[in-house]
Each structure stands twice: as structure tokens, then as C-alpha cells.
Image: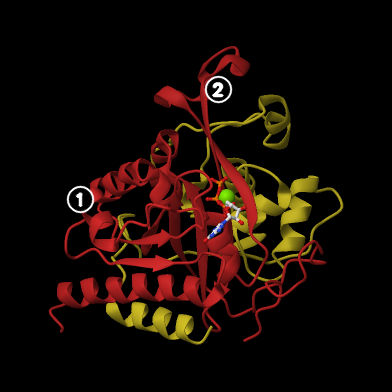
Chain colours: A red, B yellow
């Protein structure tokens, strides 16, 4: 399978999106969530076969249809922008990877956008650990299985150990926690494999298999 | 099906695109539902419908259509609902996932995903 797109020199614009094969029939999703600038887009880009694309979802607050109100322009809306990449797993299955911000208004749209996700990656910058705390809490609340990946930045002087990070985020012993470098393809790939391995173990336990 | 309220972004523009509708009958469309065109665009069709049909000559996820059109997912769902109702597209829906009223992913599927990832 070729990975066209990801190898294009920086700054060149791919002529067109690489189309999926005609047999593609199963879309799957994994969400990468984390605070501002933590490296979500970088991680998506490092493993994606297309240059990350972005789009947005917009939703009115208060659950009132716009057509029932006058003055649409004054309506309170929530907008969440997110980006995504794509990995063709085989002829039929296509994995979409979403990079999404962890701030509060995003969780308002979680069910609409990301229900049905296989699982999530919480990307952590140890210099701003509190951003991740909220994401961990919400994922647990939604019952979405996740792993935590620590994106080590160069200026990270504190260099907390994984044990310290586990404690700071109150992660249960069953939640995988790993280091990564979001810029490196093999590292990004390892993060995804760690997540799916974890999901498979959970599914196996549900199904009563080892 | 219950009609859930939705959302418009820039109201002027999106109202034009969706013919004033702001409710989606398109809750059927997940972000990763793959859309396939079943006919060529006709000259009298609305330009957004034409663009979608062109994009979907090969399967395209709803979210890719949204990004390519530069329109919020919600609006794309409405446009797709039109095309589905007239038989111009078909939709290949995701079948497993966490917490969507669909079955949780089983280990056979996850094994396939792992296999694909290891080959990257
Ligand atoms: N040193 C270092 N820099 C990184 C690493 N990962 C990302 N960066 C840089 O950090 C900056 C932010 O990365 P992004 O991938 O844009 O982060 P993001 O989470 O998508 O950011 P927002 O979408 O703005 O919230 C970029 O300039 C990256 O090049 C890393 O592992 N090490
Ligand atoms: Mg980003």
C-alpha cells in the first residue's frame, strides 16, 4: 500500500486528495485529544497517508432549532474545528484519525462527532499537565477507552517520569501510558498500536477470551 | 426518527446552500460514513450537489466531503440527505464503535486494525 501524500516535501500542495479504493466500505475512527499546541496535528500528520485536512462542526446552544426563532444571527452557537488524517488499513477498512482540542466546548459536541470511535489517545505536554486532566476525566465519563501518550518537548526541564505523570493524572493501572515523539512516524505508529492492542485486550475480556 | 435541532455557521451563506433548512434529516451520516455517487451530476443541479457527486466517484467519508467543500459537517449532512433521498448516492455506514448505539468493536475487527497498522 503506498502512503502517498505524507512524503511530499513540506510546502508543496498535493494536486488532489488520494482517492480511496472502490471497495472501501468501513470507516473507523480514533480521536487524538489534547490541549493547545500539544502536537495533535503533528501526530496525525506523521502517520497519515494524506496531508491533514480540517473542518468544523457548528451547533446551536440550548437545543433550539434555528428555524423556530427570529434573529438567527444572534443565536448562540458552538463551533469546534478539528483536523484529520487517514490510514487505509486494507482494501475495505479506512481508519480516520482526528485531532481535536480538549477544551470545554469541544465535549459539548463529542457525542455528535465522535461517538462510535474505537478509542482515544490523550496527548500530554508535561509543561501543561492540567490541560490533559480534563480530557482524561471526560473520556472516563463517556466510557471511551484511551491511552495516554506523553509528547516530550525539548524544553521540558522538569522531565517528569511516567510514574509521576500517572499519579498526577490519577490514571488507573489499566490505562497504558507511553512516551512519544509526535514528529516521528514510527513513534506515532507505536502510539496507535498501543491503543488498538489495549482495545483488543478489552474486547477479548468482554468476549471471555484471553 | 426524532428530528434533532441543528446549527448553522454563517447563517446567510448556509441558509442559501440548504434552502433555508437548519434541521438535518441526516443524523444517519456519521463522520466516517463512506459516500458513493450512484449517478453523474446533472446540469440543473445545485452546485454543492454537483461537487459532492464528483467527489464521491470513489468512496469519500462525510468528513472529507466537509473539508473539501469548506462547509461544516452539519450542512454537508443536509446536502447528503437530499442526494440520498433521490437515490443519487449510497452510504456505507460504520458498523462498530464505542457508545453509538452500535455494537462495541469486537476483537476480530481490532485484530484486523492492528494488522493494518503494523504494516504501515
Ligand atoms: N520539540 C518538539 N516540538 C513538537 C513536538 N510535537 C509537536 N511539536 C511542535 O509543536 C508545535 C505545535 O504542534 P501541533 O501539532 O500544531 O499541535 P496541536 O496540538 O495540533 O496544536 P493546536 O491544534 O493549535 O491545538 C508545532 O510547531 C510542532 O512542530 C515534539 O514532540 N517535540
Ligand atoms: Mg492542531
Locate residue B24, reporting x and y percent.
53, 39
Q: Quick one: SS at disc 1?
A: loop
Tell me the mark number nearer the camera, choosing from 1 and 2.
1
Q: Which quarter of the rendering shows the N terminus of chain A?
A: bottom right
Image coords of residue A31 (percent x, y): 44, 57
The residue depicted at 54 percent of the width and 23 percent of the height is A66
Give the Cα distance between marks 1 and 2: 45 Å
The extreme right residue here reads B43
Asked whether, in this view, residue A13 is left or right of residue B31, the answer is: right
Residue A135 spot, x, y in % from top left:
34, 46
* Of A154 and A71, the residue lying toward us: A154
Quarter, ligand 1: bottom right
Indicate the secondary structure of the residue bearing disc 2. helix
Residue B89's tag is: none
* x then y, percent, for residue B85: 59, 52
Respond yes or no on whether mark 2 lies under 8 Å from ligand 1.
Answer: no
Picture quadrant where residue A16 is located = bottom right
Is residue B117 shown left or right of residue B82? left
Question: Do residues under tags 1 and 2 come within 8 Å of each other at their CB atoms?
Answer: no
Same chain for the residues under marks 1 and 2 in the image: yes
Residue at image coords 78%, 45%: B46
Q: Is residue A98 left or right of residue A120?
A: right
Considering depth in this image, is A88 or A157 the residue closer to the camera? Answer: A157
Q: How many marks?
A: 2
Label 1 CB, ligand 1: below 8 Å? Answer: no
**Quarter of the image that includes the C terminus of chain A:** bottom left
Name the residue tied to disc 2. A67
Residue tagged 1: A170
Q: Residues within 10 Å of mark 2 (few under 14, many from 20)?
A: some
Dot 1 falls on which chain? A
Question: Could you tell which of marks 1 and 2 lies nearer the N-terminus?
Answer: 2
Amino acid at each position: 500500500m503506498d502512503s502517498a501524500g505524507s512524503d511530499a516535501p513540506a510546502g508543496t500542495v498535493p494536486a488532489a486528495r488520494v482517492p480511496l479504493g472502490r471497495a472501501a466500505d468501513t470507516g473507523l475512527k480514533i480521536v487524538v485529544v489534547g490541549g493547545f499546541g500539544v502536537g495533535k496535528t503533528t501526530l496525525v500528520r506523521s502517520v497519515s497517508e494524506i496531508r491533514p485536512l480540517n473542518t468544523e462542526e457548528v451547533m446551536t446552544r440550548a437545543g433550539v432549532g434555528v428555524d423556530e426563532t427570529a434573529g438567527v444571527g444572534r443565536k448562540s452557537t458552538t463551533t469546534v474545528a478539528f483536523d484529520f488524517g487517514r490510514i487505509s488499513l486494507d482494501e475495505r477498512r479506512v481508519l480516520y484519525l482526528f485531532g481535536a482540542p480538549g477544551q470545554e466546548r469541544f465535549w459539548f459536541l463529542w457525542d455528535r462527532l465522535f461517538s462510535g470511535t474505537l478509542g482515544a489517545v490523550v496527548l500530554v505536554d508535561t509543561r501543561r499537565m492540567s490541560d490533559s486532566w480534563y480530557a482524561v476525566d471526560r473520556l472516563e465519563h463517556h466510557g471511551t477507552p484511551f491511552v495516554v501518550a506523553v509528547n516530550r518537548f525539548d524544553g521540558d526541564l522538569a522531565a517528569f517520569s511516567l510514574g509521576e505523570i500517572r499519579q498526577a493524572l490519577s490514571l488507573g493501572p489499566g490505562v497504558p501510558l507511553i512516551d512519544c515523539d509526535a514528529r516521528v512516524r514510527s513513534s506515532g505508529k507505536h502510539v496507535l498500536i498501543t491503543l488498538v492492542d489495549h482495545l483488543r485486550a478489552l474486547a477479548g475480556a468482554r468476549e471471555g477470551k484471553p | 426518527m426524532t428530528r434533532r435541532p441543528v446549527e448553522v455557521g454563517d447563517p446567510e451563506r448556509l441558509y442559501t446552500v440548504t434552502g433555508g433548512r437548519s434541521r438535518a434529516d441526516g443524523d444517519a451520516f456519521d463522520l466516517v460514513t463512506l459516500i458513493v455517487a450512484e449517478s453523474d451530476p446533472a446540469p440543473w443541479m445545485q452546485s454543492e450537489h454537483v461537487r459532492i457527486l464528483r467527489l464521491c466517484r470513489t468512496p469519500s467519508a462525510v468528513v472529507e466531503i466537509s473539508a473539501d467543500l469548506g462547509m461544516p459537517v452539519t450542512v454537508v449532512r443536509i446536502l447528503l440527505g437530499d442526494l440520498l433521498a433521490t437515490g443519487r448516492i449510497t452510504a456505507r455506514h460504520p458498523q462498530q464503535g464505542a457508545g453509538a448505539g452500535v455494537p462495541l468493536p469486537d476483537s476480530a475487527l481490532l485484530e484486523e486494525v492492528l494488522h493494518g497498522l503494523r504494516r504501515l
